[in-house]
Amino acid sequence: MPVMFSVLEMTPDWMLTHGPAFLMALPLLMASIMAVLPNKRVAWATTFVVTALLTVTAFALALYNAEVGTTIYKMGGWAPPHGISLVIDALNAPILVLIALMSFITVIYALPATVAEIKPNKRAPFYAAFLLCIAGLLGMVITGDAFNVFVFLEVSSISTYVLVAMGAARDRRALSAAYNYLILGSIGATFFVIGIGFLYMETGTLNMADMARILADLDGGSRVAKVAFAFIIIGLGLKLAMFPLHTWLPGAYAYSPTPVTVFLASTATKAALYLLLRFTFFVFDPSYAYVADLLLYILVGMGVIGMVFASLQAIFQTDARRMLAFSSVAQVGYMLLGIGIATTASVAAGYLHLINHAVIKGGLFIAVGAMWYRFGITRTEDFKGLGKTMPWTMGAFTVLGLSLVGVPFTAGFVSKVNLTLAAANAGWYWAVGLIMLTSILALIYIGRVLLLAYFQSPPTVNGEVVVRNEAPLMMLIPMWACATASVVIGVNSDAVVGASIRAAELLLGAG
Amino acid sequence: MSEIFSQYNYVVVIVLMMTGLYIVFASRNLIKKLAGLSVFQTSVFLLYITIAKVTGGQPPILVEDKPYGADKDGHALLDGPIQVAAGDGAFLLPGPGSDVLYSNPLPHVLILTAIVVGVATLSIGLALTVRIREVYHSIEEDEIQAMDFVYNLEGTAD
């Protein structure tokens, strides 16, 4: 594509050669400067510039990766496996772009939202924690060193606990939600680090590519490697909200400040899912019996149980953000199902759904946040008449909601069709049925809200009918960016599908 | 039985790990939960320190003109100890085949990082507990959940 090559020519050389280190270092450095910045507007502007730079860098690196293949950046000039390496390959380049782009979209939305939700003297620390979270997520995706993953996982997690707790200015339940997330998140991260320790015992290295090579030489390794694998999967399962380990998620999504929900829903669980892919297919390999068993019985099992139960729970939620949070758990189930079937097509479909769902859920949470901003709405029953009072916001909510259900010409449809085809080709017809069933459940919980919004008249407050009061432009832009992206992917999905197939081929080999 | 005693540090690790995890899940007091979490994390530090002890290991010091590490078949490239000149005389670095109990620095460094992470988690947890105490006037999880339940009912009643 000629357009893309011209973009590559425009990017300076240092961005391509030192971009990987730049991606982690810039937000880390700016976060520490931000913490002492006095003025909230300067803090927002700086965050805006930083995330814009990160997005450009991530895009340039992804394009460069598509052109030259896997690149390895040696931190401090120390060659792997002894030094820490930053790896950019077909698997993590799209995730890097996703995280950078969604953080940029969140920052645009955060300008009006933080004014309403965060106390003025807390806004600079808020953006500092936000940048730390971005640095942690980008770091854990980009690094090629297993222990480094743990460090960045904790950088992002600890800043997330702080961000969730900042919702206490609006709803005190944010504090207990943050506390629960802290306990479960720390247990998850500690399980992960125990797993890394056992893996180090088995292989004597921390570099993930080196681990993969040594494990392949050992033919899957001894019982130590199996224990390591179990600990790593449980740890990551907590972080990515695998079905029985998802209990921290609804509270954290529902009571945190709305920009934090947008960012968490579209990036945090996705980065953990990326790590799951990295460990099950890259470090370990599905050709080892214990990995194949886990994929078949645990990931698929928990995935489908999560799909059905979380969708059912979403139907009975009265809080709009809790409903979307349970829907997120259900969507994680789709991704786990795709990963668990473990054919190239199904892993590609799971990966595709990961990207699409991040865009869809980010947009939906922005729309719900805008409704809270204008009318203080958190409960689904208050959606009455929103089609008349906030037509543009509700329009974006409708497009994204239908995309979540999987209506044709939307992103959700593309990923669900791919997943269904992959399941059918692998002979998993019961999984096809379950995908249909949960799509109907999704139609119920989204449709219920849409019916209220469009076919009920706006409520009367103090004897007067609520008049039209649209969300501010700074909320409409990111919301409609997500909605448009969802439709564009739905109509012409070549770029995203191509990226997901490249990622799956990297993990499983072509075919 | 003697195997268990010869590897008693693993036993300590497992006992601490399970104790910590049990405290986190069984206690309903927010501070006690954090204490349990700390015990749990500390057990991991001990695990890492345990695996850092290697008999007959070779220090990661590069000596001019001497090879280091092992070849691809796993045979050490260096046979026997190396003489190193230090401040007040020469001494021998243990090489492969020696029975010196050697401390691998890498897990120690890793766990230094993990200790910092543990401190950060604990401090955030304690800070959250202080805030919860200010808002709810309780640090018992049952009472907080009961208050949240009432709050939820009130929130949907009007």
Image (cartoon, rainbow, N blue to C red):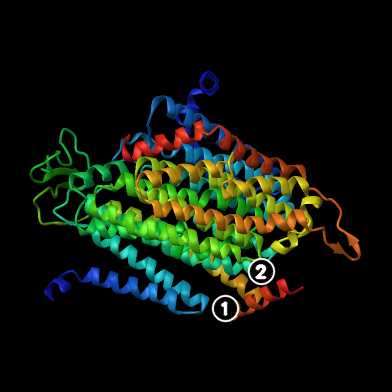
Q: Residue at x 64, y 38 (%)?
A: A484
Q: Foreground mark, 1 or 2? A: 2
Q: Tell me the kind of residue under disc 1.
A: Ile
SS assignment at label 1 = loop
SS assignment at label 2 = loop
Q: Is residue A391 above or below residue A310?
A: above
Find residue A103 and report its horizontal and vertical position in percent.
59, 44
Disc 1 and disc 2 in contact, CB within 8 angstroms: no
Q: Residue at x 50, y 53 (%)?
A: A436
Residue A172's mark?
2
- Kindly tell me whether residue A192 is visible in this rendering: no
Find residue B68 and report its horizontal and vertical position in percent.
17, 39
Find residue B143 and report its horizontal and vertical position in percent.
59, 81
Find residue A381 and report its horizontal and vertical position in percent.
72, 64
Residue B139's mark?
1
Please identify the quarter of the rendering in which residue A42 is found: top right
Letter of the chain that mark 1 sits on in the rendering: B
